[in-house]
Amino acid sequence: MRSQYSETQKHPLIKNKKRLNQEQVGILETNFCFNNKLDPDRKHQLALELGVPPRQVSIWYQNKRAREKNQSLETDHRALQQRLENVLAENTSLRGEVERLRGELCKIQELFNGFNSSVSSSCDEVGSSKHELEREYYAALIGGAGGQFVAFGGL
């Protein structure tokens, strides 16, 4: 069943609300840039200047603050999303580096274990200290990794 009342009759407090024109919006935008909150005197002054009810000015300011907040949240979200993507890419890169280093460590351990077994048999024959040979081997490994710590016989 259709209502016989018009919109203004259903809500008697709503009068023919007019949309703001571009000039009025420009004035409100300019005022908003200086202060995004309205004091009652400024609200009435703007309402008179624009020829609209003070409530419409209040609501425009309220809506403008809400739009700005949403835009700010969207900008923050995009920035955080970009940071997350960067961190995830760095994480992937670091995981690859860890795997590469683990592989190198395994190779060195295998070499060391092979050297250890050959040293223990040669130590018995030569009579030198197994510990001394391990130190020299370790120094040779470090020296081979960039030549920074070459120190045979004196670790």
Image (cartoon, rainbow, N blue to C red):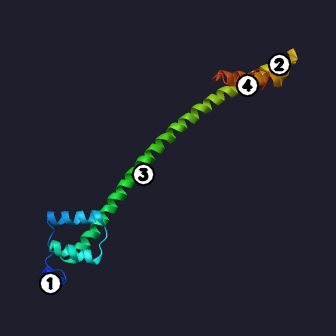
Which disc, if any, is residue 138? 4
- Residue 150 figure quarter: top right
Amino acid type of the residue tagged 1 in the rendering: Gln
- In front: 1, or 78? 78
How far apart, in angstroms, are the residues tagged by discs 3 and 4?
46 Å
Amino acid type of the residue tagged 2 in the rendering: Ser
Q: Is residue 1 visible?
A: no
How far apart, in angstroms, are the residues tagged by discs 2 and 4?
18 Å
Provide the residue designation for mark 1. 9
How far apart, in angstroms, are the residues tagged by discs 1 and 4?
94 Å
Q: Residue at x 19, y 65 (%)?
A: 27
Total marks placed? 4
Provide the residue designation for mark 2. 121
Provide the residue designation for mark 3. 80
Amino acid type of the residue tagged 4 in the rendering: Tyr
Neighbours of disc 1 within 10 Å: few (<14), some (14-19), many (20+): few
Tell me whether the residue at label 1 lies in contact with that at label 3, contact meaning CB atoms closer than 8 angstroms: no
Q: Nearer the viewer, mark 2 or mark 4?
A: 4
Tell me whether the residue at label 1 lies in contact with that at label 4, contact meaning CB atoms closer than 8 angstroms: no
Tell me whether the residue at label 2 lies in contact with that at label 3, contact meaning CB atoms closer than 8 angstroms: no
Q: Secondary structure at mark 1?
A: helix
Among numbered discs 1 and 4, the one appearing first in the sequence: 1
Amino acid type of the residue tagged 3 in the rendering: Leu
How far apart, in angstroms, are the residues tagged by discs 2 and 3?
61 Å
Report the residue that reaches farthest toward the top.
126
